[in-house]
Amino acid sequence: MVGPGTGIVPFIGFLEERRDKAEKSGQKYGEAHLYFGCRRQESDFIFKDFLQNALKDGFLSSLNLAFSRADGEK
């Protein structure tokens, strides 16, 4: 999954669906890799906790991040 500034919400939906189906059926899924970027990590990375939990719980295989601005930079 690649979210190059077009928004991450559809991918959040994919991950929620994977979690929901796995919990209901016990079904295993293949790997899911997410590449995502935004401007600032501290203010724009609003799904940080959700994505870290998905990674920890195994519904997301890898989380690859890029931030284009350092905090305090315009």
Image (spheres, grey):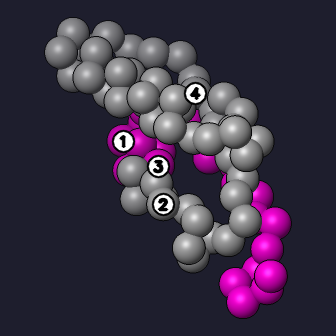
**Circle nearer the N terminus (1, 2):** 2
Residue at image point 57% right, 76% down: 42
In which quarter of the view is residue 59 placed? top left
Residue under pointer 2: 46
Q: Which amino acid type corresponds to the residue marked 1 in the rendered image? A: Asp
Residue at image point 81% right, 66% down: 68
Q: Are marks 4 and 2 in contact (CB under 8 Å)?
A: no
- How far separated are the C-alphas under marks 3 and 4? 12 Å
Instruction: Tell me the quadrant of the picture where the C terminus can be found.
Output: bottom right
Q: Residue furthest front?
A: 74
Q: Which amino acid type corresponds to the residue marked 2 in the rendered image? A: Ile
Task: Say if 15 sits above or below 45 in the image.
Answer: above
The circle drawn on residue 51 is 3
Q: Position of residue 16 (x, y in %)?
A: 35, 30
Residue under pointer 1: 57
- How far separated are the C-alphas under marks 1 and 2? 19 Å
Tag nearer the camera, 2 or 3: 2
Q: Position of residue 72 (x, y in %)?
A: 72, 89
Q: Which amino acid type corresponds to the residue marked 3 in the rendered image? A: Leu
Q: Nearer the viewer, residue 26 or 5?
A: 5
